Image (cartoon, rainbow, N blue to C red):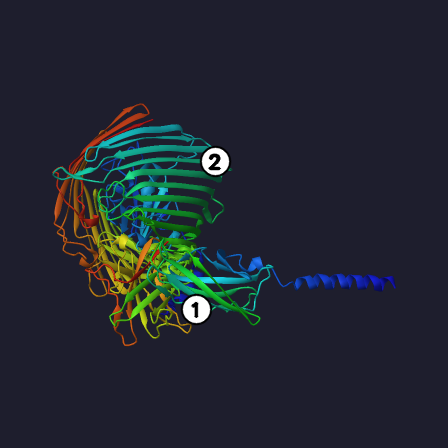
C-alpha cells in the first residue's frame, strides 16, 4: 500500500514538473540572445520590442525581429501584425520599402520583417514606425519615432534612372565580409505612390568592386546580381584583401539597357552609383 | 585536367627494387679514396671554401661572401638584386629547380620576392665546402631537375690536435664593407668544438664612374657553434647551431628593402662508422630551422603605398644515410623527410589615415610534408669503366592551413581543396670511361620536381622585372625533365682540360603567363600572370675549362661557358647566360701569390622581352690580387690585397635584376691571423 502512495506522489510530482515546462513563456530570453534590443514601443495595453543584429537602425536594409507582450509581461505569439515606416519631413511625409511581418518558424515569440530606410533621420526630420495589429479579434495600434542613423559606409542608393523612374537599391549581404568570394544580395525597388515601393523584377545589378586607395584595382570572378525566388537579387562579391572597397554599380533592365551607372575605366574612376564595404 | 599518370612509373618502380645493393655516391668517393690520375668528377663539382687561415689561398677574396665562392663554379650563375643575398641558379635554372641544403638540411626561404635564398642565412665560416651535383642525381634530399648544392659544415675533428683558431678582418672600398670575425676550435681525442662569429657591415656601393647605387647597404651578424663527442670508437654524436641575423639590407633592384632577416638553424647528428664489413658509415640527423624575414619600404621616399610584408618559414626534418661497399659496388641509401610551414602576408596603409589598412596573405600558411628514399650505387665494371646509378622516390604533400588564405585562393579557384599529394621520382645513369690521360663521361637522367610554394599557392606576388602580379596555380603537375650529359677531360703533366655539355628537355615547364582577363593589384603593375605549365622547354649548357702550369710557379687558366634556353614556341627563357669567358694568370712561390684575371661576356641579344629583359652590351673587366703569408712557428698571418674591376667599368649583366649596374673599382684587403 505504502508503495502505491509513493508511486502516486512521485508521478504527481513528475507531472507538476512537466506541467511547469508547458509554461506559456518558454525561455523567452533565449530566442533573442544573439540579438540586441533596439527599440521598445508601447500603448495602453501592449509593448512591442524591436531587435536587430547591430543594435541600431541605419539607412539601407534593416532586418528586424519583434516580440509583442501584454502588460502582464506575457508574450502574444499569434497576433496579426503589420507596420508602416513613415518619414515626417518639414513639408511632407513619405514611406519606405518594407516587408510583411511574419512569425519566425521554429521560434515561439519572434516575429520578423525588414524595412529599407532610404535615408537616415536628422534633427529636423524623423522616421516613425506605425504598427497596426490584431489580437483575438481586437484591433490595436501604436506608433513611435525611431532613430535611424547614417551608415558609416554607403549601403543604399536612391536615384532616378534614365527611364524617369525613381529607384532604391539597398545592399543586404555581405554583413560580415571576408577575403573570399562572398555571397552578395541586394534589394531593388521603385518608388510608386508615397506608400508604395514595389519590388523591381527581372533586372540585373552589375558590380565592379574596386579599391580606390590602391589605384582602383579590382578583383576577379565577381558575379552580377540577378533575381532569386525570394525577390531579392543575388550574386558573388570577390574581395581579395581587407580594407576599403567601393562596389561600383550599374542597373540594367530586362531589355539589357543600363538605366544608371557607368563602367569603371582609366578615365572614369567610379560609377555614379555604388555601395561601400570596409573591413 | 590532364591525366598525370606516367605509364613508365610502374615499370620504373619495378626497376628500382632489384637495384637495392648500391654503392657510394660520387660526392663521397672524391674525398675518401685514392685519387685516380684524373679527377673523377663529372656531374659533381666541389668548391673548397678556403678555410679561413688555410694554406692554399686559391680564391681571389678569402673573406668574400658565400655567394662570391659559389659564383666560381661554372654550373652556377648568381641573380643579383643588390649587394646581398644573390640567388644561385644551377645549370641556367632558377632556384625552384634545384635543392640547396645546409649539411643535408632542407631550408625554405621566407620571402615571396626571392630576397632570401637559403645561402643568405649562413656565412663562409660555417662551411668548408660546397658539393654541387648537376641533374637529378642531386635529388638525395629533394626532387630536383637542375641538381643540388649541399654546403658541408666546417668542423674540427677527433684528431687530438688541441686548440686552434683565427681572427680575421677585411675591408672593401667599393661599399666600405667592414668584415670582422673569429673562429675558435678545439680538437680533442673524444671531443671537438668550433665556435665562430662573423660581422659584416657595408654602405651603398658605387658602380663604375662613381655612380652610387642607393639602397644597397647591408649589415649581418652570424654566430655558429658545433660540438661533437665520441661515444665509442665508432660512434659519435654532434650538435650544431647557427644563428644569422641581417638588418637594414637594401635591394636596389626591388621596390622594397629588408629590415630584418633572421635564421636559427639547429641540428643533432649521430654517426656510426665501420659498422661491419659492408657498411662504412651511417649518419642520422634531426634538425629544425626557423626563418623570419621582414620586408620594409620605410627607406624609400617615394612609394605609391606604404606596406609591410613579413614572411616566416620553419622546417622540422631528418635524414638517415648509410654508405657501404660490396664487391665492386659502392652504395648509398638515404631516407629523408621534412615538414615545412611557409606563411607570408602583406599589409598596405592607405594615404587616407581614416581608411582601414588593407591586409592579404601572399603565402596562405602552406605546409609541405616530404618523405623520400634515395639510392645510389657506383659500380666498377672494370679498371676503366665505372657505372653510377641513382634512383629516388618521394611523397610530397601540401596543405593550406589558414582558412583566410584558402578562401583567398578560392577567389581564383572556387573548387580548390586545401590538400594535395604528389609523388616525385628520379633516376640517373652515368658511365665514365677512363683511358690513359682521358676521362669520358656519358649520362642520362630523369627528374621531377614539385612546384614551389609561390608557383602553387602564391597570391598576387609582384615581380618587379616584368611588373606583373603573379598568382599561383595549385593544379600544376610536377615538372619533369630528361637530361643528357657529356663530358671529356684530358690531363697531361701540368695541362688539364675539361669540357662538358648538357641538355635538359623539361616537360610541363612552369612559368607565369599573362592572363588578360584579370586586373592587377599592385599599383603600376602591367597585369597578372598566372603560373601555368608549358608543354616543354629546352635548356642547353656547355663549358670548357683549361689549366696550364706553363712554368714551375705559374698557372694559366681559362674558362668559357654558354647557356641557351627556349620554350615550346621558341621564345627565349629569361635569365639565360650568354657567352662568358674568364682568363687568369697565377703566380705562387714561397708563400707569395699574385694573380690577374679578365672576365667578360659577349653581347646578350638572347633575352626574354616577355620577362621584361632588354639586350645587354658585352663587357670586359679586369681583376688582380696579391697575397703573402707570414709565419712564426705555428702562427700565421695571411694578407691579401686586390683590386676588382680595375678599369672601373660600369656594366650590367643578364643576371642583374632590373639591370642594376655591378660594382665599380673595388680595393679589398683581407687579413687573417691564425694559430
Where is mark 1, residue-wise?
A: A99
Q: Going 26% across and 45% down the picture, which residue do you hit?
A: B256
In three-dimensional space, the C-alpha distance between marks 2 and 1, rounded to whole angstroms, equals 81 Å
Q: Going 39% across and 66% down the picture, which residue do you hit?
A: B415
Where is mark 2, residue-wise?
A: B229
Residue B1 appears in the picture as rendered: no
Residue A203: % across, % down: 32, 73
Residue B376 appears in the picture as rendered: yes
Residue B552: % across, % down: 19, 36
Question: Residue B553 vs residue A205: left or right?
Answer: left
Marks 2, 1: nearer the viewer: 1
**Residue B350 badge:** none
Circle 2: is it few (<14), some (14-19), or many (20+) Cα within 10 Å?
some
Residue B462: % across, % down: 27, 53
Q: Going 49% across and 38% down the picture, which residue do you hit?
A: B233
Q: Is residue B660 above or below residue B397?
A: above
Query: Chain ID for label 2?
Result: B
Amino acid at each position: 500500500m505504502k508503495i502505491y502512495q509513493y508511486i502516486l506522489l512521485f508521478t504527481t510530482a513528475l507531472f507538476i514538473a512537466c506541467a511547469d515546462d508547458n509554461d506559456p513563456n518558454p525561455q523567452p530570453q533565449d530566442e533573442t540572445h544573439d540579438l540586441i534590443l533596439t527599440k521598445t514601443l508601447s500603448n495602453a495595453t501592449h509593448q512591442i520590442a524591436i531587435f536587430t543584429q547591430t543594435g541600431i537602425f541605419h539607412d539601407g536594409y534593416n532586418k528586424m525581429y519583434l516580440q509583442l507582450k501584454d502588460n502582464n509581461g506575457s508574450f502574444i505569439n499569434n497576433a496579426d501584425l503589420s507596420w508602416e515606416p513613415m518619414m515626417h519631413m518639414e513639408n511632407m511625409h513619405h514611406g519606405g520599402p518594407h516587408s510583411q511581418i511574419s512569425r519566425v518558424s521554429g521560434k515561439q515569440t519572434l516575429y520578423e520583417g525588414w524595412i529599407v530606410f532610404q535615408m537616415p533621420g536628422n534633427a529636423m526630420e524623423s522616421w516613425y514606425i506605425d504598427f497596426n495589429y490584431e489580437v483575438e479579434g481586437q484591433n490595436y495600434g501604436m506608433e513611435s519615432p525611431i532613430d535611424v542613423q547614417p551608415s558609416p559606409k554607403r549601403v543604399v542608393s536612391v536615384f532616378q534612372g534614365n527611364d524617369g523612374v525613381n529607384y532604391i537599391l539597398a545592399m543586404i549581404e555581405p554583413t560580415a565580409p571576408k577575403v573570399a568570394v562572398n555571397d552578395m544580395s541586394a534589394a531593388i525597388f521603385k518608388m510608386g505612390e508615397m506608400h508604395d515601393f514595389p519590388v523591381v523584377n527581372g533586372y540585373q545589378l552589375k558590380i565592379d568592386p574596386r579599391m580606390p586607395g590602391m589605384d582602383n584595382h579590382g578583383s576577379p570572378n565577381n558575379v552580377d546580381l540577378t533575381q532569386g525566388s525570394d525577390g531579392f537579387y543575388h550574386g558573388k562579391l570577390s574581395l581579395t584583401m581587407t580594407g576599403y572597397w567601393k562596389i561600383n554599380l550599374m542597373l540594367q533592365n530586362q531589355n539589357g539597357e543600363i538605366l544608371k551607372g557607368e563602367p569603371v575605366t582609366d578615365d572614369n574612376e567610379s560609377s555614379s552609383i555604388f555601395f561601400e564595404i570596409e573591413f | 585536367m590532364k591525366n598525370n599518370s606516367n605509364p613508365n612509373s610502374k615499370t620504373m618502380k619495378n626497376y628500382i627494387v632489384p637495384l637495392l645493393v648500391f654503392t657510394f655516391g660520387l660526392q663521397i668517393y672524391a674525398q675518401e679514396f685514392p685519387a685516380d690520375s684524373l679527377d673523377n668528377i663529372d656531374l659533381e663539382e666541389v668548391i673548397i671554401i678556403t678555410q679561413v687561415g688555410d694554406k692554399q689561398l686559391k680564391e681571389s677574396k678569402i673573406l668574400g661572401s658565400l655567394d662570391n665562392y659559389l659564383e666560381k663554379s661554372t654550373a652556377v650563375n648568381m641573380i643579383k638584386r643588390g649587394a646581398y643575398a644573390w640567388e644561385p641558379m644551377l645549370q641556367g635554372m632558377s632556384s625552384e629547380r634545384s635543392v640547396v641544403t645546409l649539411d643535408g638540411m632542407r631550408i625554405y626561404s621566407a620571402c615571396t620576392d626571392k630576397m632570401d635564398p637559403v645561402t643568405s642565412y649562413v656565412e663562409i665560416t660555417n662551411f668548408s665546402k660546397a658539393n654541387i651535383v648537376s641533374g637529378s642525381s642531386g635529388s638525395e634530399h629533394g626532387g630536383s631537375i637542375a641538381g643540388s648544392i649541399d654546403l658541408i659544415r666546417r668542423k674540427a675533428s677527433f684528431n687530438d690536435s688541441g686548440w686552434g683558431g683565427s681572427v680575421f678582418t677585411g675591408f672593401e672600398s667599393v661599399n666600405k664593407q667592414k668584415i670582422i670575425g673569429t673562429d675558435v676550435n678545439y680538437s680533442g681525442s673524444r671531443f671537438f668544438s668550433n665556435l665562430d662569429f662573423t660581422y659584416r657591415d657595408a654602405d651603398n656601393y658605387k658602380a663604375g664612374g662613381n655612380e652610387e647605387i642607393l639602397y644597397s647597404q647591408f649589415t649581418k651578424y652570424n654566430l655558429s657553434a658545433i660540438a661533437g663527442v665520441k661515444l665509442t670508437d665508432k660512434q659519435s654524436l654532434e650538435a650544431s647551431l647557427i644563428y644569422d641575423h641581417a638588418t637594414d639590407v637594401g635591394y636596389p633592384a626591388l621596390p622594397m628593402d629588408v629590415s630584418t632577416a633572421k635564421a636559427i638553424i639547429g641540428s643533432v647528428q649521430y654517426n656510426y662508422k665501420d659498422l661491419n664489413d659492408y657498411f662504412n658509415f651511417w649518419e642520422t640527423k634531426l634538425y629544425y630551422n626557423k626563418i623570419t624575414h621582414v620586408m620594409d619600404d620605410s627607406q624609400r621616399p617615394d612609394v605609391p603605398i606604404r606596406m609591410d610584408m613579413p614572411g616566416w618559414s620553419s622546417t622540422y626534418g631528418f635524414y638517415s644515410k648509410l654508405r657501404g661497399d660490396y664487391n665492386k659496388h659502392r652504395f648509398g641509401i638515404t631516407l629523408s623527410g621534412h615538414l615545412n610551414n611557409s606563411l607570408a602576408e602583406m599589409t598596405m596603409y592607405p594615404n587616407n589615415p581614416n581608411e582601414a589598412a588593407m591586409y592579404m596573405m601572399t603565402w596562405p600558411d602552406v605546409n609541405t610534408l616530404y618523405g623520400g628514399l634515395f639510392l645510389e650505387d657506383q659500380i666498377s665494371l672494370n679498371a676503366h669503366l665505372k657505372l653510377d646509378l641513382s634512383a629516388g622516390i618521394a611523397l610530397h604533400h601540401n596543405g593550406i592551413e589558414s582558412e583566410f588564405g584558402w578562401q583567398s585562393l578560392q577567389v581564383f579557384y572556387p573548387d580548390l581543396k586545401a590538400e594535395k599529394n604528389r609523388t616525385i621520382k628520379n633516376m640517373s645513369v652515368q658511365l665514365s670511361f677512363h683511358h690513359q690521360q682521358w676521362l669520358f663521361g656519358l649520362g642520362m637522367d630523369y627528374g621531377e620536381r614539385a612546384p614551389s610554394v609561390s608557383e602553387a599557392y602564391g597570391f598576387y606576388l609582384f615581380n618587379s622585372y616584368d611588373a606583373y602580379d603573379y598568382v599561383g596555380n595549385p593544379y600544376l603537375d610536377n615538372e619533369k625533365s630528361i637530361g643528357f650529359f657529356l663530358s671529356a677531360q684530358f690531363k697531361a703533366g701540368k695541362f688539364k682540360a675539361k669540357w662538358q655539355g648538357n641538355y635538359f628537355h623539361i616537360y610541363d615547364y612552369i612559368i607565369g603567363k599573362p592572363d588578360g582577363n584579370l586586373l592587377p593589384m599592385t599599383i603600376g603593375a602591367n597585369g597578372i600572370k598566372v603560373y601555368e605549365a608549358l608543354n616543354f622547354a629546352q635548356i642547353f649548357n656547355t663549358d670548357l675549362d683549361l689549366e696550364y702550369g706553363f712554368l714551375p710557379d705559374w698557372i694559366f687558366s681559362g674558362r668559357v661557358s654558354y647557356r641557351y634556353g627556349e620554350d615550346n614556341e621558341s621564345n627565349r627563357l629569361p635569365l639565360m647566360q650568354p657567352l662568358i669567358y674568364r682568363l687568369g694568370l697565377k703566380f705562387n712561390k714561397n708563400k707569395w701569390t699574385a694573380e690577374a684575371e679578365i672576365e667578360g661576356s659577349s653581347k646578350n641579344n638572347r633575352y626574354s622581352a616577355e620577362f621584361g629583359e632588354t639586350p645587354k652590351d658585352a663587357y670586359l673587366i679586369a681583376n688582380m690580387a696579391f697575397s703573402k703569408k707570414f709565419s712564426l712557428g705555428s702562427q700565421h698571418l695571411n694578407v691579401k690585397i686586390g683590386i676588382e674591376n680595375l678599369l672601373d667599368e660600369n656594366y650590367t649583366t643578364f643576371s642583374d635584376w632590373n639591370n642594376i649596374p655591378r660594382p665599380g673599382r673595388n680595393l679589398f684587403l683581407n687579413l687573417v691571423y691564425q694559430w
